[in-house]
Amino acid sequence: MDSTKYLSVQSLTKYIKYKFEKDPYLQRVFLKGELSNVKHHTNGHIYFSIKDDKSVISAVMFRYDAEKLNFKPEEGQNVLLAGNITLYEARGQYQIYVKEMQIDGIGQLFLKLEQNKELLKEKGYLNPEHKKAIPDFPEHIAIVSSSTSAAIKDMITTLTRRYPLVKVTLLNTYVQGARSQDSVLTNLTRADKLGADTVILARGGGSIEDLWTFNELEVALAVFNMNTPVITGVGHETDITLVDYVSDLRAPTPTAAEQAVPNIRDLQLRLGELHRQSDNLIMSKIERSRKVLDGLSNYYKFKNPNLLYTEQTERLRDLTVTIENHMSLSLSENRHMLNKHMSGLSYNDPAPDIRNYQEELLRTENELKRRMKAVIGQKSERLAGNINVLESVSPVQILKRGYSYTTFNNKIVTEAKNLNVGDVIETSFNRGTVSAKVTEVNTDD
């Protein structure tokens, strides 16, 4: 047997992989299917399978491409993929390297709905404190919906049947299709300016595509910013749209009408009950008052009014005596307190102390004058002595004894060497001065 014609498994695998990589139809493949066996690896890669009802293929999405996704791939999601087909040599298994992935069809809509909901939640628009109260007894209700809808006819019938007093204004609105978003936004603005007590935004049931206008972020923000309370009745019980999260009350069609107004029959029953209770209270009070009146009419004093006059006269006399006694006692007590205070004032009369202080002040003043006179005399004698001493050493006294002093340039000359021949000097005597010119300077000691 010639073994050279046999290939190794590796060689065959490499050849098949080469064929895959060279086939242009396998370099950009577009697939749709359901995710299965999804595994998110710690290194960021995603390993999974993509399948339909008849076949399955392995797939991998590397971290670089996975980081670009705007959702988290999970089991059972229907997706659209783009990538290239290659062969995994270790197992001889072909697989797709996914470059792009997005939710398929309805799944994509649900993903967008969740994203819009999270955005509103982050901004606090879903918080309960933003909910406005629905009026209990509205006078005017504006309905934003299609006039051709079977549900709207049921709603208007329900409103007029339950509460005939309410005025209903229908703003005909496109609720599906390309023109629906602008139509809903325009009529919400109109409804908010009508002065209505409540606005109902409604349409019948349908698929998520049919109801998508009410999942648009712009429509939800318009509902949130309404000044008028808004009840949303979009779809059936299981149909929850984005506007339902931001409206003031969500009531699936057709129960939105029942939530907007009270039932007049219930009000009539309640009014009847209140009327009966009011009658019972009034009759009970009348009965009690009649019994009191009967009791008073049988009172013996009312049958003989003189007894009332006599009783009140005696009471007046007793009160007069009591007041007179009280006043007499009060005057006596006050007179006693006055006498007591007068005695206290006489005992504490400040006049003697004032006279004593005045005499002491006079003695102190005389002593102060005497001491001041003695001090002034002593100071005068000392001053005269000091003057005599100063006069004894005064230059004037020296001049009076025949001495004089000489100055040059207003400075006293103490030595002849400080002068020069020709200098003009001035000599001062006891009386008068003499100017002279130096003709000779002798510095001999």
Image (tube, rainbow, N blue to C red):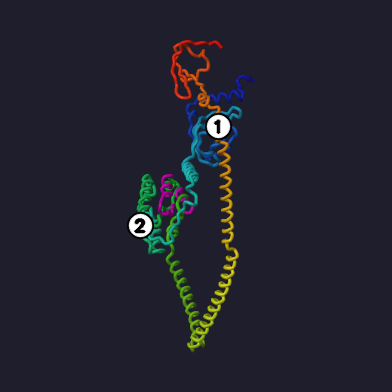
Residue that extends furthest to the right in the rendered view of this protein: 1
Residue 295 in view here: no
SS at circle 1: helix
The crowd level at tag 2 (other Cα within 10 Å; few <14, some 14-19, many 20+) is some
217 over 393 or under it: above or below: below
What stretch of residues is rendered in magenta?
A: 217-244
Question: For the residue marked with disc 2, what is the amino acid?
Answer: Thr
Location of mark 1 (residue): 388
Residue 340 in view here: yes
**What residue appears at the point 44 percent right and 12 percent down from the top-left corner?**
422
Residue that extends furthest to the front in the rendered view of this protein: 401
User: Where in the figure is residue 222, as x and y percent of width and height?
Assistant: 41, 48
Q: CA distance from mark 1 to mark 2?
A: 128 Å
Location of mark 2 (residue): 169
Mark 1 or 2: the one toward you:
1
**Quadrant of res 178:** top left
Q: Earlier in the sequence, mark 1 or mark 2?
A: 2
Q: Is residue 235 magenta?
A: yes
